[in-house]
Image (spheres, rainbow, N blue to C red):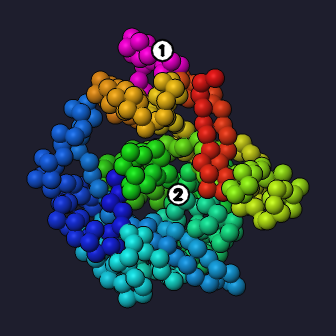
Amino acid sequence: MATGDFTHPAWFGQLKTKLVPDKPGLFALAPEIERQVAYKAPPSCQGQVNFILSVEISSIYKKNGKTRKVHNLVFFPDMDSAGRFSDKLGKIGNIRSDGRPILGLDARDLLEIVLETNPDGFLIPAHIWTPWFSVLGSKSGFDCLEECFDDLADHIFAVETGLSSDPSMNWRVSSLDNVTLVSNSDAHSPAKLARNATVFLCEPSYFAMKEALKTGDSSLFGGTIEFFPEEGKYHLDGHRKCGVSLHPEQTALNGGLCPACGKPLTVGVLNRVCQLADRPDGHRPQKAHPFLSLIPLESLLGEVLKVGPASKKVQAAYEGLLAEFGPELFILRDLALKELERRKMPLLAEALSLMRQGRVTRTGGFDGVFGKIKVLP
């Protein structure tokens, strides 16, 4: 699990007092903190959690005559490197106002600072297709990684798919063949942890994980766990104010304008992928890694029980399932369906079966509005 926000002085102070070095380049909770929180997870879900030092940086700057807005994830293997990196950024802009600092710093120059601070550090472009704040986004991004990172582009060996795209969409763009596709949820939302996740098969250490990402070796890297991309809030083109969503071909027919009010549409991820794609839909590169699309267990329970996913009824069922069967990802991916039938939850077993087969109903998100994925009629 990534710590997030290590450049923020107050949070970094917490990290230094509450984490201790563990496996190479990774950290664990200090024993006294571990004792304070261990009881909060049911015994079936308990296990050691390791942390990797990370921060997301928002870069807003001018390049090649356009305003660029790019989010990047930065990782380091030790507190000293993270502290020195933060000190350098503190001389460039304000790192105290937000956990994700906003800096007028070229993404290429940010990468250079990472490498100068510690060559073992690395940078991953975040949610690379999001319209407003990403390296390939329709509103303020570039057409390829090389345009953004110039002479340092070879140091980019992984990119993050984001909620509104999945690996199969990225496979259509051949310029991404040489980078490893990762997927992450936002650690600021604990209930949504592992909604998206990256699967490592290597030993649990910072350096082994970096090597897995850098080489893409299938014996070290196991692919990703994904949202269904249609659920992402920028999958389709659209105009939220008018409640209008369009597929790329419809946007083209409307000249990129909202058919209701005539204002420009927000061009979504699917359209942007189509713009940069040089391969047909369905192409799978030779070195592609597997991925699995899942629906959060609380959402499935909400469908089954016909109540909201945040309801007390869902929470009680959710906690009961975890206590009996173990972690949510095990239930979603591996739990034998007969176990749920034995527990008199046949509808949940059916929902899990349909999800695992990808037999879902998809309504695409647009212009900041989340899409909807349903499994039951």
The CA span between labels 2 and 1 is 36 Å
Under circle 1, the secondary element is helix
Instruction: Tell me, for residue 160, which label it has, or none.
Output: 2
Q: Range of the magenta residues?
A: 333-350
Q: Which residue is at the far left?
A: 32
- Residue 326, above or below 223: above
- Residue 255, above or below 163: below
Q: Amino acid at mark 1?
A: Pro
Instruction: Tell me, for residue 187, which label it has, or none.
Output: none
Q: Amino acid at mark 2?
A: Glu
Taking the image as shown, residue 213 lies to the left or right of residue 136, namely left
Residue 363: in magenta span: no
Q: Quadrant of the C terminus?
A: top right
The chief SS type of the magenta part is helix
Taking the image as shown, residue 358 lies to the left or right of residue 311, namely right
Q: Which label sits in the foreground, 2 or 1?
A: 1
Q: Which residue is mark 1?
A: 346
Relative image position of residue 371 (x, y in whole percent): 62, 44
Can residue 282 be seen in the rendering of this structure?
yes
Can residue 157 be seen in the rendering of this structure?
no
Relative image position of residue 322 (x, y in whole percent): 32, 30
- Residue 43, above or below 27: above
Relative image position of residue 168 (x, y in whole percent): 64, 46
